[in-house]
Structures are given as structure tokens and as C-alpha cells.
Image (cartoon, rainbow, N blue to C red):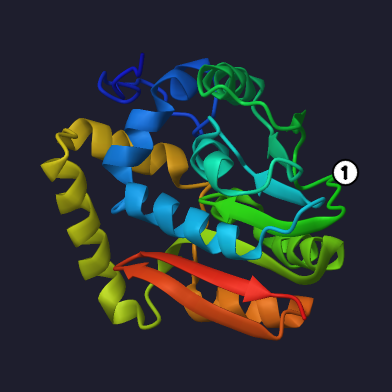
Amino acid sequence: MENKDKVFSQAITKPSDFKFGATVANAFDDMVERSVPFYNEIQRMIIELAIEHAVPDTNVIDLGCSTGTTMIGLNPFVEENIKFIGVDDSAEMLKKCEVKLKEAGFTRDYELVLSDIHHNLKIENASVVILCLTMQFVRPIYRPKLLKKIYDGLLPGGVLIISEKILAEDSLFNRNFIKYYYDYKRRNHYSELEISQKREALENILVPYKLSENLTMLKEAGFAHTETFFKWYNFSGFIAIKL
């Protein structure tokens, strides 16, 4: 049963950096649905794009797989001989993911990997790699290396699908976009305390880039073709293909 997100509902004396521990893992599905505009539609679009490019006898790799929502959504639509690999640096998230995969009746070959994608990341025989709200948590200095490693591990014709919190291209719009985003959270019944405490907890670990900066990084990693498939104020989705 899904727990409601109450992670920041009580006043915290000494706010610390946001962590994907047991408390967050148990409330994560509710948290993203209420915190990310059009989250379910973004998931549907990611799955639609992945279906188009997932190739038999290859791997579909979800980096920052959290509770497995993307893999569960994709599972009925691709060949059984495609292996799913979910990677996350939170053991608690992977435990929740394992439970959800079993509840979903997974029969395909899959692997859940506890790993920090800053280090020791293996991308092999991949037709699809997914970064759903993950790259924003990768330290900026590592992002170009991560994208290059993904590019090198993708098969020709393989795709990288990313959804990400972003900055406005023109900083004049940032303040308004953030205001609209907090209005969205209020409409989803987050209190002012929850909004402010989560903002403070994420301040040092979630570092958004402009959409143009993300697309430039993809080109520099070797991706010749990129396209934006989703945009809502300070959230975006984009895809890159390896020829």
C-alpha cells in the first residue's frame, strides 16, 4: 500500500541534505506524483519511446530506477528476451522496487544493482538507457563523463531518454517558473512548511541545468540527434539517439 508523503510535514530543527532512505522510499510514489507536474504522463511518454527502440536480446537500463515504476510500466510491451537492469544507490529504494516487481508478476530476466552512478557504472549491450529525474542529482563535474559512458555502452540505434528539472533559458523567467511550480505543489496539498523544508534539503544536491546546456552535453558526448518531447515550466523530457 502506498504511503502518503509526510517527509517534511513536521518542523526540522537542523535541516540536512535530502536522502533517499527508508522514509522517502516508502512515500516516494506519492511524492513524485504530487511533486512532478504530469509525472504519470512523463512516465507514459518514456515507456512509449522505449518501446520504439528496445531491441530483442539487449538490455534496457534504468539509472536511478527508484521503486521500479518505469520498468513495471514498460514490462508488458517489450519482448520477454529483453533484460531489464535497474540501478540505484539507495538500498531502501531497491527493496521497495523488488517488492513492486514481484507484485507486478515479473517473469522476464531482470537485475537490480546497488551502485552509485558516479562510479563503477557498467553500460553494456544497451538499446535503451533511461534517466528519469536522476541526472539532476549527479554532481555537475561527473555529468559529461556519465553521458559519454552511456553513449559508449549503447548499441548503434540505441537511445537515451531523460526527464529532468531544468532552469529557464533566460534567468528573468526562473522566478516566475519556480513560483508556478510551488503553486502546483500547493494545489497538491503540500503546506508552506513542507515546500520550504524540502527546498532547503534539496538545495545542495539537486542542481538543474538549462535545457540547452543538457542538449549541448549530449552532443558533446557523441549523440548526433536530440529532441525535446516534454516541457512544463521548469521540467523537461528529451531523447538522444546513437547512430
Vertical comparison of 224 with 127: above or below: below
User: Is 188 left, or right, of 76 in this rendering?
Assistant: left
Which quadrant: the N terminus?
top left
Q: Nearer the viewer, residue 161 or 110?
A: 110
Q: Tell me the residue at 32%/34% (across/down).
A: 197
- The image shows residue 31 at horizontal and vertical percentages of 35, 33
Image vertical order of residue 81 relative to residue 51, above or below: above
Q: Residues within 10 Å of mark 1 (few under 14, many from 20)?
A: few
Kindly identify the residue that appears in the image at 71 percent across and 49 percent down: 60
At which x and y percent is residue 50? Answer: 58, 58
Q: Residue at x 83, y 46 (%)?
A: 121
Q: Secondary structure at mark 1?
A: loop
**Left or right of 191: which side holds 70?**
right
Q: Position of residue 159 (x, y in %)?
A: 67, 67
Q: Amino acid at mark 1?
A: Asn
Number of disc labels: 1
Front residue of 238 and 164: 238
Q: Nearer the viewer, residue 48 or 220?
A: 48
Q: Residue at x 51, y 17 (%)?
A: 103
Answer with left or right where residue 189 lies relative to residue 117.
left
Q: Residue 7 placed where, x, y %?
A: 35, 23
> Image quadrant for the C terminus?
bottom right
Residue 94's quadrant in the figure?
Answer: top right
Q: Which corner quadrant of the image does residue 144 belong to? A: bottom right
Which residue is tagged 1?
Answer: 120
